Image (spheres, rainbow, N blue to C red):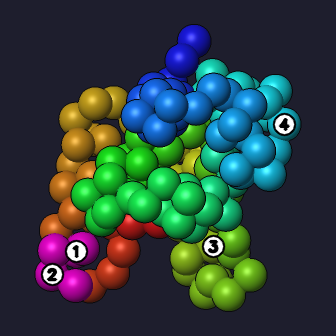
Amino acid sequence: MITKLGDYLRKLRIRNQQILKNMADELGVSSAFLSAVENGKKNMPESWYDTLRERYSLDNAEMEELRQAAMESQKTISLNLNNASETNRQLAVSFARQFESFDEKLGRQLLEILRTRKKRGDGGGPDEE
């Protein structure tokens, strides 16, 4: 099944009159890997943001659209806890353990807390990479 990221990348290819192989070559990966990213079987590598911006002259709005599509297409995420405080480590583990039990209301409440913090400049939010 094509993801939002896959849809974005396909539109980008069409706009630039490219086939899958051409974009894969631009990104330095196989066509099979690019296809797996588009279909949600693999997450988009972080390095692709800079490569796509440079190769396809993406402006800030297009980059934000790409980031949003990539975020919405991810099935898994990982956190680097190397420099995290003990409290933040416990928070991350507790959140991960309870995540699947969150109902829609609690999810919206937590998201609003993070968005409010981001708007105030108190820290990153869910829209930040």
Q: Could you give the CA–CA distance between mark 1 and mark 2, rounded to whole angstroms?
A: 5 Å
From the top left corner, tell me how far across and down residue 93 is, in percent. 63, 59
Is residue 100 a member of the stretch shown in magenta? no
| Disc 2 element | helix
For residue 120, the mark is: 2
**Pointer 3 and pointer 1: residues touching (CB < 8 Å)?**
no
Report the residue at 21% width, 49% height from top. Answer: 109
Report the residue at 39% width, 66% height from top. Answer: 128
Report the residue at 39% width, 58% height from top. Answer: 58
Instruction: Give the mark nearer the N terminus: 3 vs 2.
Output: 3
Side of 4 where 123 appears, left or right: left
Q: Could you give the CA–CA distance between mark 4 and mark 3, rounded to whole angstroms?
A: 36 Å
Amino acid of disc 3: Arg
| Residue bearing the label numbered 4 | 30
Instruction: Give the mark nearer the N terminus: 4 vs 1.
Output: 4
Amino acid of disc 2: Arg
| Residue bearing the label numbered 1 | 117
Side of 66 where 97 appears, left or right: right
